[in-house]
Amino acid sequence: MKKEAKKRVAVNTRFLLKNKLEGIGIYTQEIFRRVVKLLPEYEFYFLFDRKPDAEFIFDENVKELIVSPQARHPLLWYWWFERSVPKVLKELNADLFISPDGYGSLNTQVPQIITIHDLAFEHYETHTPFLVRNYYKYFVPKYCAKAEKILAVSNFTKQDIIERYKIDEEKIDVVYNAVDLDEMSMVNSQWSMAEKLWSLKKPYFLFIGAVHPRKNVLGLLKAFENFKTDYSHSHQLVIIGRKAWMNNELENFYSSMKFKNDIVWIEKIERSMLLEILKNSFALVYPSFFEGFGIPVIEAMSLGVPVISSNTSSMPEISAGAAITVDPHNITSISQAMNELIANENLRNDLIEKGLRRAKDFTWDISAKKVADLIRDAVV
């Protein structure tokens, strides 16, 4: 009897970059390191746009393929997704293409599952560079229309897709971002190299995320300046994240700050040390204007760190009463919340307890199982 060929699933893994994992990269890593083990009978082809680190080849049923060119510009995105990827899918005779970063391909008949993390470019057009914004606004609705299934990382994002692009809600499944509780349980609560490398001094507030206008880091700097002026606390502010784009106004404000010596900027850091800095922080301050989910919020909660986050987009859904929520446009409300966590120890302890409970609602095992089930349904 002839042995049945294994089903072939191609996955866009171009955001799996060693020591450079941000939200989408973490999502891709945590979902697919589990999915490939849940589906050992499938062959997975991970499509990278550069030589990957071996740590991202998660199991024996994973094969790496380097697909050129390196896609980090709208013109190269177009070439990668509309020329290079379709060619690879045809050569593989792939049964399914999964793209966890919101992109798809219009030039292939292979069924697709795409993940939409947010539609921030629709809400904050001026916060996205011109070519990037135009690419998203033209292609993302088409990707959503063409995909067999769309994964949204929150109910907020699901409703946003339905309302913006008139997509049938039956086509969209919510697969939350999550936190690796095993990884969090191993995070060191004692200082090691972090204090020496960056001259960190407890207590400090922390922000984690790419530094661009949508994340409202400028607003955070203004709030911190007010906080230091109005309350005279000794706290530092630590900002961890690459400086992405459109930060001239931020740089100008920072250069004029009275308390800029109390700010520590860290652009590149190993994840283990990032989590150590997070665990030892006084609180995470995450006043983003718009998020499809907001992974740092749940990571902070899982480590027993209280959170100040925004009252906009998906963040009230994700925090569910386990964080202080503020108007990100109101600088005073941010600085007052920072002081409130210092002045009200009972509030801080209550948020820590609620956060620890809330974090348990988001596990990568649950999310990965949903994705594995959808793959089984899509590849008959």
Image (cartoon, grey):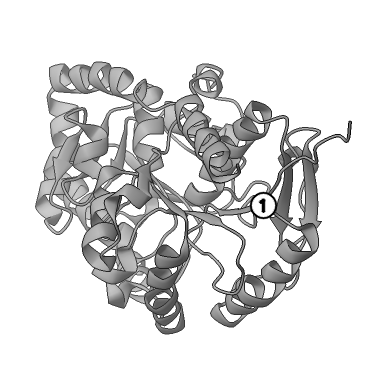
Please give the name of the residue rendered at 34% of the width and 27% of the height, measured from the top-left corner.
301
Nearer the observer, 218 or 201: 218
Please give the name of the residue rendered at 40% of the width and 79% of the height, measured from the top-left corner.
138
Q: Position of residue 334 (x, y in %)?
A: 16, 47
Please give the name of the residue rendered at 44% of the width and 71% of the height, measured from the top-left corner.
245
252 vs 108, left or right, is: left
State the quadrant of the N terminus: top right
Quadrant of residue 4 in the image? top right
70 over 298 or under it: above or below: below
Q: Position of residue 114 (x, y in %)?
A: 49, 55
Graded by Cα atoms within 10 Å as few (under 14), some (14 to 19) or many (20 or more), the crowding at tag 1 reads many
Which residue is identified by label 1? 95
58 vs 120, left or right, is: right
Q: Can residue 176 be seen from the camera position used here?
A: yes
Q: Position of residue 36 (x, y in %)?
A: 67, 34
Nearer the observer, 361 or 262: 361
Quadrant of residue 355 in the image? top left
106 vs 211, left or right, is: right
Question: Mark 1: which amino acid?
Answer: Asp
Quadrant of residue 212 in the image? bottom left
State the quadrant of the C terminus: top right
